[in-house]
Image (cartoon, rainbow, N blue to C red):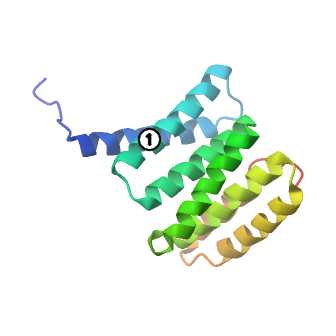
């Protein structure tokens, strides 16, 4: 009991945001998921975003909406995927000075995937092309590699 760490409310929100975000990635990395794991995936992504909205910046909110959009895409939830991608893009647009170059690329990627899931391949193609251009312009080689690797992975619903 003497080794227990006490957290402030802010630290607790940060800890929960990070731990649930990591859990989302663990679940996304599975080649297949049970129904219970799919529910956990959605809950973890929502929980992470909730906690970041309590104590984070616009960047945290943008990335949380991106993550939730990706989860909805993986789960085949078209309307929710597009809603979250649009929120991600809106946050990017209104907070450009806070975004990293890869955040802008990921915002376009989320729109491309959500539109592809929805079957709107014209809009998906337009956003995919923007994502590619922004991704190729990412300055940090490691960030660029991560983005382009993500762009090439996952389901594109007939787009690529």
Against 104, is 19 above or below? above
Give the class, few, some or many, for how many residues have Cα within 10 Å of label 1's Cα (few <14, many ≥20).
some
Residue closer to the observer: 151 or 116: 116
Quarter-of-image position of residue 14: top left
Q: Position of residue 90 (x, y in %)?
A: 58, 62
Query: Which residue in the protein does label 1 denote?
Result: 50
The N terminus lies in quadrant: top left
Q: Is residue 27 left or right of residue 80?
A: left
Farthest residue in the left direction? 2
Residue in the foreground of this view, choosing between 42 and 33: 42
**Residue under the image location 18 percent in, 35 percent down:** 5
Q: How many marks?
A: 1
Q: Position of residue 69 (x, y in %)?
A: 64, 47
Residue at the (39%, 42%) spot, across then down: 51
Q: Looking at the image, which residue is at 51% across and 49% down?
A: 64
**Quadrant of image for the C terminus:** bottom right
Question: Horizontal placement of 10 versus 68: left or right?
Answer: left
Residue 104: percent from left, percent from top:
59, 68
Q: How far from the left and from the top, in percent, is residue 44?
A: 51, 34
In this rendering, is residue 8 above or below 145?
A: above
Q: Secondary structure at mark 1?
A: helix
Residue 94 in sight from this viewpoint: yes
């Amino acid at each position: 009991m003497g080794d227990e760490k006490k957290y402030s409310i802010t630290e607790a929100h940060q800890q929960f945001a990070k731990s649930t975000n990591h859990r989302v990635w663990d679940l996304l990395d599975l080649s297949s998921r049970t129904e219970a794991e799919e529910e956990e995936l959605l809950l973890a992504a929502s929980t992470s975003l909730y906690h970041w909205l309590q104590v984070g910046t616009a960047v945290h909110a943008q990335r949380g909406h991106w993550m939730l959009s990706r989860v909805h895409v993986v789960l085949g939830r078209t309307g929710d995927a597009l809603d979250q991608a649009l929120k991600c893009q809106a946050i990017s647009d209104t907070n450009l000075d806070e975004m990293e170059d890869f955040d802008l690329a990921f915002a376009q990627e989320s729109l491309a995937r959500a539109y592809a899931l929805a079957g709107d391949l014209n809009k998906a193609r337009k956003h995919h092309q923007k994502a590619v251009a922004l991704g190729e312009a990412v300055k940090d080689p490691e960030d660029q590699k991560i983005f382009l690797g993500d762009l090439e992975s996952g389901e594109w619903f007939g787009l690529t």
